[in-house]
Amino acid sequence: MQAKFTEGSIFRHVCVMTFASTAGLLSLFLVDLVDMYWLSLLGIVELAAAIGYAGSILFFTLSFAIGLSIGCSAMVSHAVGGGDKGETAQLIGNLFLTIFTVSLVVSLVALIYAPWFLTKLGAEGAAFDFALSYLRIVLPSLSIMSVAMATGGVLRALGHAKESMYLTLFGGLVNAVLDPILIFWVGWGIEGAAVATVLARVAMVTYGFYRVAGAYQLLRMPKMSRLLADIREYFATALPAVLTNLATPIGVAYVTATMAQFGDGAVAGNTIISKLQPLAFAGLFALSGSVGPIAGQNFGAGKIDRVMETLSSSIKFIAVYSIVACLVLLTLTDVLIWAFKVKDEAARLIRWFCYGLSSMFFFSGITFVTNALFNNLRLAHWATLFNFFRATVFTIPFVLFGAKWGGPVGIMVGLYIGAVLVALAGLLMAVYKIRQLPVQDKVV
């Protein structure tokens, strides 16, 4: 078990890990977008709106799962830096049990309150019914998805980015194959898309266990004598990470509810954009999951200068990637509007996004990276703080004013301004905190 990120070019590690993870994420995000495309062919505008409403709730649960996986990856990367394989395997077993149990409880609560959440988001009529049907199928599989993501976090913490990529590619492939079969051939519509999502999650967790437990022998049965100690240490990192990630869907839910004031067309346009964003900027989402293990291993080995280099290399990557992604969106604007058969407000929103507002992801990418560093340097409370302010102080008033000033487009402009401000504040704090880390101490 080698801590491979403590030697060699940091920028190369960032690029290799990120591009490997990007391929896997692209498969999932592409399938998510294809879901929207298949459902749009049914010619029912309420289906697109329903995915938007359900997606806001699922974003909460997915963000919860991501937070749990971040805590898992951080602890495992520190253990890998320490070099004890037996202790690492025991830790992973305890963490997987904890993640499964907590996620199961959260999924049940979300399932019970799903109708209330949908009503608060502004869903009504057919859109409400479609969204509720979708959620009742997908929500119970949260614990499966959480453990699947945790296995991916372990693989990244070990430095095996390609295998983490294969995990998501496998899930994406299963979903892509089953979507048209269940939506059209079986005739299940939106319920078919939900079933395909659940089966893809099962495929992912199966592959993840196969690699972690089978190939690397890094999974032991939970041990009660140290379970409570591991849980306490885990939640010291995971709880702030969960709160950090839950802050974002709070902002997303507020945006969805505000968009709903302008009708299903605005919600549909915003939903399509929300599916385009992770696809176009998958590299930035992958980067946030890649820099954590790199920083974590070097922090565990006491090499703080390489932690700072991880931050600077990540920003270089963000700049280049954002320029390319924005140019691609600009080129494909009319194609996207034609493909999704949208018009009026929905088409107008997509056009504004592709014509320049998509560049907000340069700043969002900086926030992704600084939050990942905070979570992996035992400074997770700072990630929570910045994400909370991003979702509230730097979202709600800007969206509210933007809606009054420019309608749905004004909402997006407000989001852009908030993203810029919180990114700059987070970057300054990250530099300050990294410089304060004790170079002489080795954390094990």
Image: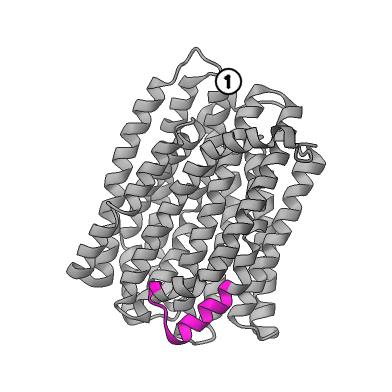
Image position, residue 377 (x, y; %): 49, 30
Q: Quick check: 277 left or right of 205? A: left
Image position, residue 300 (x, y; %): 57, 24
Q: Quick check: 176 left or right of 56? A: right
Which stretch is magenta?
A: 120-135
- Give the amino acid type for the residue marked by disc 1 in the picture: Ala
Kindly indicate the quadrant of the structure image that contains residue 309: top left
Q: Name the residue: 35% across, 53% down.
A: 391
Q: Name the residue: 74% across, 37% down.
A: 224
Q: Which image quadrant: the C terminus?
A: top right
Tell me the residue that label 1 is attached to: 301
Q: Would residue 159 be visible to someone looking at this image? A: no
Q: Name the residue: 43% across, 21% down.
A: 437
Helix, strand or loop at mark 1: loop
Q: Is residue 251 above or below residue 112?
A: above
Q: Name the residue: 55% across, 50% down.
A: 66
Per the image, is 71 magenta? no
Q: Main secondary structure of the magenta part?
A: helix
Q: Would residue 261 be visible to someone looking at this image? A: yes
Image position, residue 435 (x, y; %): 38, 22
Relative to the observer, which residue lies in front, 282 or 430?
A: 430
Image position, residue 91 (x, y; %): 69, 35
Question: Within 10 Å of the Cα at label 1, are there few (<14), some (14-19), or many (20+) other Cα atoms?
Answer: many
Per the image, is 131 magenta? yes
